[in-house]
Structure formats: structure tokens, C-alpha cells
Amino acid sequence: MRRILAAACAAYLMPGWATESWLTVQGNPTDPAADTVQVAPETIAVFDTLRSVQVRVNRAARRDTYDGGQYQSYRATVEVNCQTKTAQFRRHQYFLVPLWTGESRIVEHQEGNLPPVMFRSLTPNPVQRIVQAACTLQEVKTR
């Protein structure tokens, strides 16, 4: 199941992949100095108790990546586990500049070493809102 999810996730975040339909969970997507979190609702894929969703994040200041690089904004594929109510990053597309522009670098995280979605220093922290929304999608579709 995880391999199928990994393949589906990878297909969403290829270079040049873009969506015009971003839902702002927090922040201001036109302000390069704002901490912003957005999700692309149409990208949610359901795999039993797992979900895949695309997110993009802009930070007010440059930050360190999980692998020691730096970024100010990124797009990512997130895997949500509805049984454990947790979320992990499968793939990042990091940008050194705000608002998802300029050159980027892609990092694919390995199974067994997927970093948790945390959004450090964001208040309120939107992780659980994203998990809850992704996990209730199947309930909404089946009603």
C-alpha cells in the first residue's frame, strides 16, 4: 500500500507541477514576509487509511531544511495516516526565495525516514487541521 501511495505522491510534485486552486489554511499567500500554509484540496488522494495531499509553505524568514540546506518556501507531498492522526513529508521542492519562485531543489524522503509535518513556530499550528480535513474527506465523499 505504501509503495502505491509513494508512486502516486511522486506523480504530483514533478518539476513544473502546479495547481491554481490553493486553500489558505494560515497566513497571506501574496505577502513574501508572511508565514503561510496552503493546501491543494483537489490533490487529496485516498488509499485506505492513508491520504496524500499537496501543501505549500512560505516562511517569513529563511530556515534550515531537514537535510541541512536552506529554504524560504516549499511545496511538498504530505502523507496523512488517519489511523494514527499523523502526517509525514514524502517529498519537498525547496525554494531559496519566498512565494515558490526561482530555482528549486527536490528532496525525496526515504521510506522509514519520513520527516514529520510540524510547522515549527507557527501559532496556531495547522498540522491537526490539515490531518482532520484530509481524514474526513472519505466520510464526506461517501455520504
Image: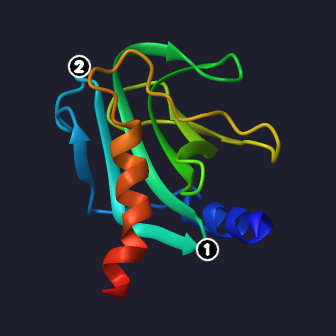
Q: Nearer the viewer, residue 54 or 72?
A: 54
Left or right of residue 123, residue 103 in this image: right
Residue 107 higher or lower than 51, as above or below: above
Residue drawn at the location 59% of the way across and 56% of the way down: 83
Amino acid under label 2? Answer: Ala
Q: Find residue 48 and name its label.
A: 1
Q: Position of residue 57 (x, y in %)?
A: 38, 36
Q: CA distance from mark 1 to mark 2?
A: 38 Å
Residue 115 higher or lower than 112, as above or below: above
Q: Nearer the viewer, residue 45 or 11?
A: 45
Q: Are marks 1 and 2 in contact (CB under 8 Å)?
A: no
Residue 101 visible, this orientation: no
Label 1, secondary structure: give it.
loop
Crowd around label 1: few <14 · some 14–19 · many ≥20 (10 Å) = few
Residue 121 higher or lower than 98, as above or below: above
Q: Position of residue 110 (x, y in %)?
A: 80, 44
Label 2, secondary structure: give it.
loop
Q: Position of residue 113 (x, y in %)?
A: 79, 37
Q: Find residue 81 and name its label.
A: none
Instruction: Report how many numbered discs are placed on residues in the image.
Output: 2
Residue drawn at the location 61% of the way across and 73% of the way down: 47
Left or right of residue 64, residue 135 in this image: left
Residue drawn at the location 48% of the way across and 58% of the way down: 53
Residue drawn at the location 31% of the way across and 45% of the way down: 38
Q: Position of residue 130 (x, y in %)?
A: 38, 48
In the picture of the structure, the residue carrying the numbered disc 2 is 33
